[in-house]
């Protein structure tokens, strides 16, 4: 029996010596995936991010019957070259919190002298996103390795995370090869208004969103306790902390 062909199906009969079977196969266009290496020559000049257009034209594919012209769904792509010579590490919180940055201090072999965690990713401009991961998704990688744990003490138990009306303890991995004390500060947007700014709660109590203020830290893992945390987003009562 000759195969029966349609635009989408191929149907034929198979016999294994004892049983006839009706075979059905769906016809689809062949798909080929290829990796195209693109050489980018870098330099040490501080400059904005750059980009160029890559266009594929005249591609062919090898099939059983020979070589055919390939049909490319999207034949062009924009290649972005992220500058990594800026010498600064920018904050990546959402844009409403403003732009923060610090100069990167390195030792003679290029390792960071002062950082939260052991890695840094230099940038020449701020890369923000709503979930604060914009600079983690670029080619320079993820440098958010400073926070080891964040816990709260409730009724004699230690639990992960923040609890309204309690103190929080942050354990931080600090790289400090400067030979001097560094100072750690931390802010939490307690009322969720997109700002790190002091405010007055519903009962007229002043609330500071700077929950750790300039605590001295050396090198290695250190733990620091926050100020008392009010109810998040809408403070309706004073803290119950001592």
Image (cartoon, rainbow, N blue to C red):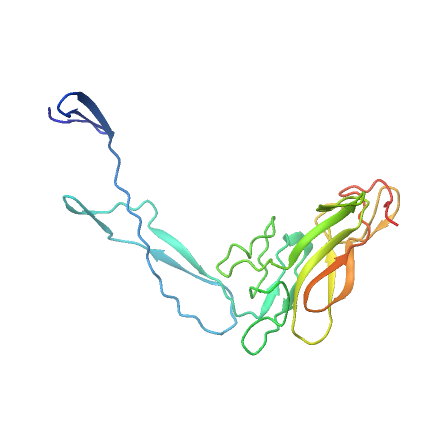
**Can the viewer see residue 189?**
no
In this view, 12 is above or below 220 = above
- Figure quadrant of residue 41: bottom left
Which residue lies most toward the top here?
19
How many dots with numbers?
0
Question: In the picture provided, is 146 more to the left or to the right than 167?
Answer: left
Q: Residue at x 38, y 58 (%)?
A: 53
Residue 92, given in percent of the width and then of the height, sits at 61, 56
In the image shown, does 61 or 166 lie closer to the viewer? Answer: 166
Which residue lies most toward the bottom here?
108
Quarter of the picture holding the N terminus: top left
Q: Residue at x 60, y 48 (%)?
A: 131
- Figure quadrant of residue 180: bottom right
Residue 94, given in percent of the width and then of the height, sits at 63, 52
In the image shown, does 46 or 178 lie closer to the viewer? Answer: 178
In this view, 76 is above or below 83 = above
Residue 195, given in percent of the width and then of the height, sits at 72, 52
Q: Residue at x 73, y 58 (%)?
A: 186
Question: In the picture provided, is 60 more to the left or to the right than 141?
Answer: left
**Can the viewer see residue 234?**
yes
């Amino acid at each position: 029996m000759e195969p029966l062909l349609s635009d989408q199906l191929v149907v034929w009969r198979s016999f294994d010596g004892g049983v006839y079977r009706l075979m059905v196969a769906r016809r689809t266009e062949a798909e080929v995936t290829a990796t195209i290496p693109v050489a980018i020559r870098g330099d040490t000049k501080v400059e904005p991010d750059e980009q160029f257009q890559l266009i594929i034209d005249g591609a062919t594919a090898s099939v059983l019957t020979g070589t055919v012209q390939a049909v490319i769904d999207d034949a062009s792509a924009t290649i972005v070259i992220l500058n990594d010579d800026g010498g600064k590490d920018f904050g990546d919180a959402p844009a409403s919190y403003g732009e923060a940055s610090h100069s990167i201090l390195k030792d003679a072999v290029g390792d960071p002298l002062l950082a939260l965690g052991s890695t840094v990713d230099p940038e020449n401009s701020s890369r923000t996103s709503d979930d604060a991961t914009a600079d983690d998704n670029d080619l320079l990688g993820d440098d958010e390795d400073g926070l080891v744990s964040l816990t709260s003490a409730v009724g004699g138990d230690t639990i992960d995370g923040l609890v309204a009306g309690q103190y929080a303890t942050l354990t931080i991995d600090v790289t400090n090869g400067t030979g001097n004390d560094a100072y750690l500060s931390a802010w939490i947007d307690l009322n969720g208004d997109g700002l790190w700014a002091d405010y007055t709660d519903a009962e007229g109590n002043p609330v500071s969103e700077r929950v750790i203020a300039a605590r001295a830290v050396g090198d290695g893992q250190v733990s620091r306790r926050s100020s008392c945390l009010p109810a998040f987003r809408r403070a309706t009562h004073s803290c119950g902390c001592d």
